Image (cartoon, coloured by chain):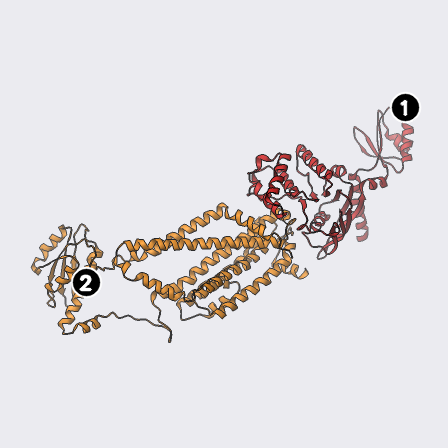
Chain colours: A red, B orange
Amino acid sequence: MSLTVSHISKQYGDFTALHDLSFELAKPGVYALLGTNGAGKATAIRIILGMLSKNSGEVLWKGKPLSPVSERVGYLAEERGLYPRYRVMEQLVYFGELKGMKKPQIYEAIDYWFDRLSLNEYREKKAEQLSKGNQQKIQLVAALISDPELIILDEPLSGLDPVNADLFKSVINDEIAKNKFIIMSCHQMPIIEEFCSDIAILHHGNAVLQGNLNEIKKSYGRVNLSVKCDGNVIPLASECGLTPVEVTPDRIDFKIKSEQQAKELLKKIVASDMPLVRYELREPSLHEIFVENIEKADNAAKEVSA
Amino acid sequence: MSTYGWKKVFKFTFVQTGKSKAFIISTIVICVLVLGLSLLIGVMPLLTSSGSGSVSQGDTLAAKKVYFIDNSGITSAEEYKQSIEQLGLQFESRDASELESLTETVNGSTECMLITVSAGEESIKIYGARPKDGSVSKDEADGILNLISGCFSTLRLEKMGLDEQQVANALAPVSTSTSVAGEEEENMAVSVIKMVVPMVSSLVLFILIFAYGQMVAQSIAQEKTSRVMELLLTSVRPLAVIIGKILAMGALSLMQFLMFIAAGVVGGVVSMPIVSSAGTAVAQSGVFNEMANAIGKVFSGFSPVAIVAVLVVFLIGFIFYALIAGLVGASVSRMEDLNAAMQPYAIIGVVGFYLAYFPTTMAGIGEGPNTMAIISYYLPFSSPFALPSAILTGSLSIVEALIAILVLAVVTVLTAILVARVYEQIIFHNGNRLKISDILGLARNK
C-alpha cells in the first residue's frame, strides 16, 4: 500500500502553477509539502485530491489512480469552511454521508471525536456560534470522521492556542501510530521536524529540494557552531577565519566550512583559559535549509533572466 | 464525469433550505396572500351584486306592504297587483292626490314602500320610496322596481295589441359580439381569463424560476467563499454538487408552487359556500356556470399530457436558468461581488420574462398569436415563462409545443455541457471576478 505522485503538472495559460512534482509515500508516515505562499502546495494538494485536473502526471494509491470519491480521504483545508448557519451535528452527518458512511457509523465516530476533542457541548450549536478554535476542531472531525487511510492536513495548527495545538498534535500522533499516510503542509518548521520523515520544498511551482529530512540534514553536515564563553570569543574566532552570523546574550553562532575550524576554535578557547559555557556543533535547522534553498532558487532565476 | 453523491447533496440542500426561516416565512406569507386573493375573487360576484336590483318569488324581503300610484295613463295600478303579491307583499292601490301623505307614512314606517308610475314628456318614470331607517335596503327596492319596470313594458306592448309570443320576442334581450370568421364567438369571461392566465402564469413562473435560480447562485457562492466547497469536493465531483443543488432548489420551487395553487383552490372552495349561503340571486344566476364554462373553453388544451408537458417545461426551464446562475455563483470569490456578477443573469431573465409577458397576454386578448408571442415560445430565455400557459390554453398545437420544448431542452443540455467543462476550474478561481469571455475561454482551453 503506497501513495505515488508522479510528474504532476498544472498550467493556467502561460502560468505554471506546478511543474513535474513527484514523490512517494512507500510506507505509512508523514510527508511534508513546504513552500512560500503561492509556491504550488495548494495546487499539488488539490490535484492529489482529484479536485483539480492536471496537465500531466498521475497520482496512484495502492497502485491505482486515486479517486477520493471512491476512497476515504481526509482533508483539513488551510482556509477552514463550515456552513455558518447550520447545526454542527447536521453538517458532520452530511459530510459523513458524502464519504459513504451509514448513520450509525457517523454517530459513533462523532461521539468518539467529540469526547476526544471536548466538543460535546457544541453538538446542537450553529457553526457561527463557535469560537475559531472550536470551529477548527469541528473541521478536524470532518476530516477524520470516516477514519481515512490517507489524510491531507493543510496548516493544521495555524491559529490555535498552545493547549489546542498540543491537542491537535496528539491527534496527529495517534493517526501516525495507526499507520496512516499523511501529507502535511505547514509553515511552522518545528512542527514539520517533529512529525515528518520526508519533505519537498516547492518554489514557484518547482520542487527545489526533496528527500528524507535526516538525509538532507546529513548532506549539509554539521555546519552550525554555537559558542558561549565568559569572555570575548570573537577575536579568537576571527583568528580561525570565523565571523559571527548571530550574536545573542545566550550564544554566538558561526557558520563553519569544516569541522576542523570548530576544533581549532575550541583549542584556542582552552589555551586562553577562557571559561567555556556552551559549545555545540550541529546540522542546519529545517528553517535554515528552507531559506537557503529558496534564496538559491531565486538567485538562479535572476541569473537566468539576466 | 462522475455525479456520485448528487442525491446526498440534494437531500441536504432540500432539508436545510426547506427548514430555513426565509423559506418558511415566504411560503406562509405568499400562501396567505393567494388564499386571501382567491377568497376575494370568489366572493367578488357577491360584492359586485350590490345594486344589481334583482328579486324573485320566494326571496325573503324586508318590505311587507306596497302603496301603488299609477297616473301614467298607459297602465293602471291594479294591473301590477298580481306581480307584487307574488313576492309575498301586501298591495294597496292609491290615488295620486295621496302622494304627500303616503310619502310621510312610508318615511316613518319600517316595512312599507311607495311606488309611483308616471308619464313624462319623453319617458315613463317609475319611482320607489322606502323607509328612512333603512329597514328596506336600496338593493331590495331596486329589485322590486325592476320587476315593475318589466311588468310595465309587457303591459304596454299587450295594450298595443301584441300577443304573448310577440311580446316575448319584442322584449328579448339584444346582445352584440364579434369573432374571427369561422371561429366560435368569445364572451367577456373567456376574454378576461385568456388575458389573465398567461399574465399570471408567466409572472409566477418568472418569480419561481428566477428567484430560485438566484438562490442556487447564492448557495454556491457561499460554499465557495466559505471554503465548504473544498471539503465537499474531497467526496463528490463539482458536477454532483451543482446537480444536487439545482434539483433540490427545483423541487423546493415546485413544492412552493403547488402549495400556492393549493392555497388558491382552498380559497375558491371556501368562498363558494359563502356566496351560496348568502341566498342571493347571484348564487343562482348562473355566474358560476358562466365562469366554469369560460374556464373550460380557455383551458381547452388541459389534459394529463398537457400537465406533464408543463411540468417538463418548468423543470427544464428551471435547470436552464439555475445552471447559468450556478456558473455565476461559482465565478465570484467574494460574496459582495455576487450582485454585480448576477447582472447579466438578471438582464437575460427580465428580458425573457417581458418577452413572454406582454406578447402572450396580448395574444390572449387579441386576434390570435402575434409574431412576438411565437418567438417567445421558441426562445429559451422566454419559453419557460411563455410555454406553460400556451400549452394549457391550447394556443400551441402538440407538435409546436414539442418543438418548443425540444429547443429548450437542447439549449439546456448545451449549457450543462459548458458548465461541466468550466465549473471545476471556476470553483477554485480566486481573485478578480471572471467575465463571460474568461469563462468561454476556459471552456475552449479545457
Name the residue nearer the viewer: A200 or B401.
B401
Q: Quadrant of residue A124?
A: top right
Q: What subunit carries mark 2? A: B
Q: Separation of disc 2 and disc 1 at Cα?
A: 139 Å
Give the residue displayed 54% in from the left and 66% down from the top: B406
Tell me, yes or no, if residue B330 can be seen here. Answer: no
In the rendered image, residue A83, in percent from the top left (x then y), is placed at 58, 44
Q: Is residue A132 left or right of residue A233?
A: left
Q: Is residue A195 left or right of residue B207?
A: right
Disc 2, disc 1: CB below 8 Å?
Answer: no
Element carrying mark 1: loop
Rendered position, A239 above or below B291: above
Element carrying mark 2: helix
Q: What subunit carries mark 1? A: A
Residue tagged 1: A273
Tell me, yes or no, if residue A32 can be seen here. Answer: yes
Give the residue displayed 63% in from the left and 37% down from the top: A112
